[in-house]
Amino acid sequence: MQYSELRRLADTSRFNRFHAAVLFWGALILVLDGYDLAIVGAALPSIMKDMGVDANSAGLMASSALVGMMLGAITFGTLADRVGRRLLISVCVGLFSACTAAAGLTSDPYSFSAMRFLAGLGIGGVLPIMTAHMAEFAPARLRTRLVTLVFAGYSIGGILVALMAKQVIAAYGWQSIFYTALVPMFLIPFILLTVPESLPFLIKRQRFAELRKTVGMFAPDFTIPDNARFLPPEEATSGNRPVAALFQHGRGLSTVMIWTAFFMGLFMVYALSSWLTKLMAMAGYSLGSALNFVLVFNIGAMVGAIGGGYLGDKFNIKYVLVSFYALGAVALTLMGYTKSTELLFIVVFVVGASTLGTQLLAYAFAGEFYPLAIRSTGVGFASGIGRIGGVVAPVLIGWLVSLKLPLEQNFFAIGIAGAVGTVAVMLINHSRSAAMQARNVTTPLAPATARVRVAG
């Protein structure tokens, strides 16, 4: 049986309990992932005071997790296409849960940075895997919305940190917020038992009984003949060169532009995730008020991700993404010049929708761009290369903060990344994307056994 038939079957399936379960796990894991990442930004002023570090050192401490995220996205994203997503998701959850909790036990910037680096491996690794996983099973007409709903969990994690940090840090110290990150460890057995495996991986490992069961859950009206043989995707038969495949079939320039867009998007996201609380404190707001801005930022990000996903399914996702990057550049520039507190909350909301929300939409875009057999690799490398922007951002903004420049210049520096990201997305050849090419295949797959072609 040609894999393309299973692919079209998933594309044309109706949303059911199977899809809801994949969505649930994806969103929940991203809530935990976003929580672990946002912890440092919320606790950074308290950590700086407790450890006696300046802005430059704090920037390096915040970047340690981002270096880990860069390596984790590239390593685990690529490895997932070879050893299975379910196992790698569990490994990533274990890493970021245990190591974030361990960071709360540290008392110096060096051991803290080491623990955050290890946690970053898991935080960065799970993002591309969950993107590819939701994109694989989602019906085509809902794919962008479902992927961005998964990533809305990322913003919910940030919201939880903002809500908890004000009370917990004040009452029990910054360490306590890190200890709560140990809770996801208890979910690992359930992940191993219930999360479905990727179809190309099951075909490659010849786990046909599990394959039939999975297909039966997302397409219950379709029956696979007992004597069917399964042929892997064409990309999977070209050897173990998933990275090289990112540049084949006219995808080379677009891959580089996707990497550039991710670099700029993640620069904006992690500049704000690491320094928004501190920048608002510099503007004269108390810790509680500054964390309120973080809360509004993450609410905006969630609205931007869901709204962007809806627009991406209704219109050309490339142009939706271009609009979001451009809006982010404008909103960040305005943020430095807005003096009214009420108006500033509105601007911060828009900034969240058009920076973190944009990046979540970019994951959905990358998930649609690459063929399924190299999707985890494609999204993983885009995320990993983009993490360089995330690593640079806290250090650069920390340096700018140490120069005591006017506040608006800090926000303008972040906004420049949005303008560059706008140009990068415009240069992507969307006609080469897997989603666009799949839409050009007009022959539907009927849900009946008569349409199955049995190889051999």
Image (cartoon, rainbow, N blue to C red):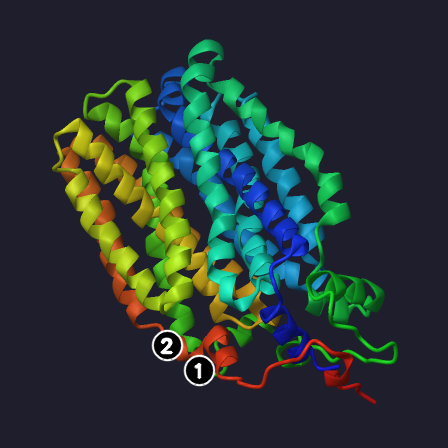
Label 2 secondary element: loop
Asked whether 113 or 279 is in front, the reply is 279
Q: In percent of the image, x 53 and y 68: which residue is there? A: 140
Going by the image, does 154 lie left or right of 273?
A: right
**Mark 2 Cα shell of 10 Å, populated few (<14), some (14-19), many (≥20):** some
Residue plotted at (59% across, 71% down): 12
Residue that label 2 marks: 429
Q: Which of marks 2 and 1 is nearer the N terminus?
A: 1
Disc on res. 250: 1
Is there a contact, CB below 8 Å, between mark 2 and mark 1?
yes
State whether residue 299 is above or below residue 380: above
Indicate left or right for 223 with 72 as reference. right
In this view, the residue in front, 250 or 114, is 250
**At which x and y percent is residue 153?**
50, 42
At which x and y percent is residue 120? 53, 42
Q: In which quarter of the image is residue 205?
A: bottom right
The amino acid type found where label 1 is placed reads Gly
Which residue sits at x=12%, y=30%? 339
Q: In which quarter of the image is the N terminus?
A: bottom right
- Work out whether residue 141 can be spotted: yes
